[in-house]
């Protein structure tokens, strides 16, 4: 999977990472190649546009640490954006099957691999989670499909609902529900009928079954080899039936990978599993990290950049601790703190980690200090000159007015900031006196 895309991209990035310095034009031309490679992999155009835009924005604004090249940095940005494009908010492998018997509805077109996936999933739930699973086929149009599920069930040691000739899908669903309750099953999985195309009858039937069992998960099975079509099928199924996730099959083939890359961005639905073969154990939880790694094939560089970033941040923290220990705390330090707070999800986060800061943290939040406030304060500090940042006592009334105006804010905001800085500087001095290896050191490490 992704071989062509991966090859194209590694070509682009090999060239990029070998260069010492990068101009904006270098990055731009690399991104043009990335764009072409993604389009050739059948990723949809709006998704490609968004992707390239996001990478380009980050690549131009990034501070580069000494130990890595700008090209390596770009690789890392592309890697992170790939993950952002692929990943949903929740763990794809965790199915909502907490209240037994939990119904799972499998939907999809004929030939997508729905029946095989149903068996794969049942095997996974049984083997990995020790669940008692009941399977039922609702594909009354194709007796062979019902037989196939029964055979697969026997192979993997999972019960299937006995086939009753002439029964309609709704009746089968009801019987499965009753049987799952009476039989003490944890999960029952309904393999609905597939058609070659989405039609009104197929949708009406799936919706009726859905209304009978109220599935905890509705998983759409789509053929990963069909590229954009897979994404269109997902959009339509979701609009008409509502799906909670997608299983992409045939990812073991040499498909171009576009479906995987566009799926979440376009449908908003996460890929939960991928099918990697015909056997019942060929199912993998979708892992955005691993897929991004496979696509880029540049794991070494990604790890290197991550390490460099961590080192850089640790060095910065260390520098700050040293300054604090000497009782030094100017506007640059305050800005560093404010930026750190923003990164760590606001005021409370950082303050709560620093002993003795709890009270101040409360005062700050009482005073209505939130992320917007943090950003305004950073803007004020940015509007100062270098000298003023190093020594805010230099600020006269006229400069204060100009700084506030420069940041588009009122002078009272600046005065508040200066007061806050003074309080913190006093605190730092006191804490600094506690000596090396004291509380601050512990709090920052
Ligand atoms: P259904 O009509 O949607 O129920 O599709 P089936 O489950 O019967 O699968 C159709 C064909 O695709 C069968 O030959 C399966 O073995 C095959 N198949 C299903 N999933 C995969 C997969 O992930 N990889 C490969 N290579 N083949 C698959």
Image (tube, helix red, strand yellow):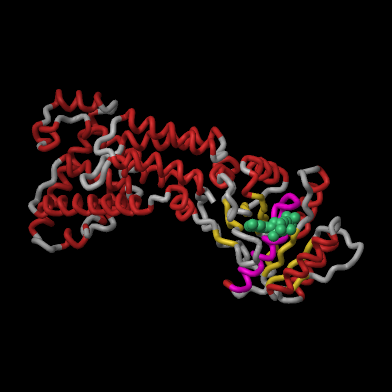
Position of residue 174 in the picture relative to residue 133 (left or right):
right
Question: In the rendered view, would you say 329 is above or below 119?
Answer: above
Left or right placement of residue 20 versus residue 244 in this view: left
Q: Position of residue 214 (x, y in %)?
A: 72, 58
**Residue closer to the observer: 94 or 54:** 54
Residue at screen point 33% across, 48% down: 346
Q: Splitting the image into 4 quarters, where does residue 285 fall?
A: bottom right
**Main secondary structure of the magenta stretch:** helix
Residue that appears at 12% across and 30% down: 395
> Can you give x and y, in whole percent of width and height, for residue 57 in the image?
37, 34
278 or 105, nearer to the observer: 278
Residue at the far right in the pictured view: 166
List x then y, in percent, for residue 341.
29, 47
Q: Nearer the viewer, residue 221 or 155?
A: 155
Residue 123 x/y as whole percent? 64, 69
- Residue range in magenta is 106-127
Q: Quadrant of ligand 1?
A: bottom right
Q: How many numbered marks appear?
A: 0
Q: Is residue 105 visible to the viewer in this orientation of the structure? A: no
């Amino acid at each position: 999977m992704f071989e062509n895309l991966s090859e194209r991209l590694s070509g682009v990035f090999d060239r990029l990472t070998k260069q010492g310095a990068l101009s904006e034009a270098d990055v731009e031309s690399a991104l043009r190649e990335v764009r072409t490679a993604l389009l050739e992999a059948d990723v949809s155009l709006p998704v490609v546009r968004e992707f390239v835009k996001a990478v380009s924005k980050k690549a131009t604004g990034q501070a580069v640490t000494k130990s890595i090249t700008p090209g390596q940095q770009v690789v890392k940005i592309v890697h992170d954006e790939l993950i952002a494009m692929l990943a949903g908010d929740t763990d794809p492998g965790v199915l909502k099957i907490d209240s037994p018997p939990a119904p799972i509805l499998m939907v999809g077109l004929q030939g997508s691999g729905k029946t095989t996936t149903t068996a794969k999933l049942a095997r996974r739930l049984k083997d990995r989670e020790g669940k008692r699973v009941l399977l039922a086929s609702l594909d009354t149009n194709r007796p062979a499909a019902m037989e196939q599920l029964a055979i697969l069930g026997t192979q993997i040691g999972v019960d299937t609902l006995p086939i009753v000739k002439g029964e309609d899908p709704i009746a089968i669903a009801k019987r499965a529900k009753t049987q799952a309750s009476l039989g003490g099953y944890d999960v029952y999985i309904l393999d609905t009928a597939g058609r070659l195309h989405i039609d009104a009858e197929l949708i009406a039937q799936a919706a009726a079954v859905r209304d009978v069992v109220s599935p905890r998960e509705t998983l759409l099975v789509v053929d990963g080899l069909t590229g954009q079509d897979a994404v269109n099928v997902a959009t339509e199924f979701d609009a008409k039936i509502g799906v909670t996730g997608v299983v992409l099959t045939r990812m073991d083939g040499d498909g171009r990978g576009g479906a995987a890359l566009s799926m979440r961005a376009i449908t908003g639905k996460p890929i939960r599993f991928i099918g990697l073969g015909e056997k019942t154990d060929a199912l993998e939880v979708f892992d955005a990290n691993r897929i991004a790694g496979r696509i880029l094939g540049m794991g070494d560089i990604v790890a290197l950049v991550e390490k460099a970033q961590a080192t850089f941040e640790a060095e910065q923290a260390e520098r700050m601790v040293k300054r604090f220990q000497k009782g030094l705390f100017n506007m640059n330090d305050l800005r560093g703190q404010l930026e750190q707070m923003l990164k760590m999800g606001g005021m409370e986060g950082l303050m709560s980690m620093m002993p003795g800061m709890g009270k101040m943290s409360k005062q700050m939040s009482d005073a209505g200090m939130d992320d917007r406030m943090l950003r305004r304060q950073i803007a004020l500090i940015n509007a100062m000159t270098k000298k003023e940042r190093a020594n805010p006592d230099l600020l006269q009334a006229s400069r204060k007015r100009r700084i506030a105006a420069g940041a588009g804010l009122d002078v009272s905001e600046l005065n508040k900031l200066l007061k806050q800085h003074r309080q913190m500087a006093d605190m730092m001095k006191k804490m600094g006196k506690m000596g090396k290896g004291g509380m601050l050191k512990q709090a920052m490490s």
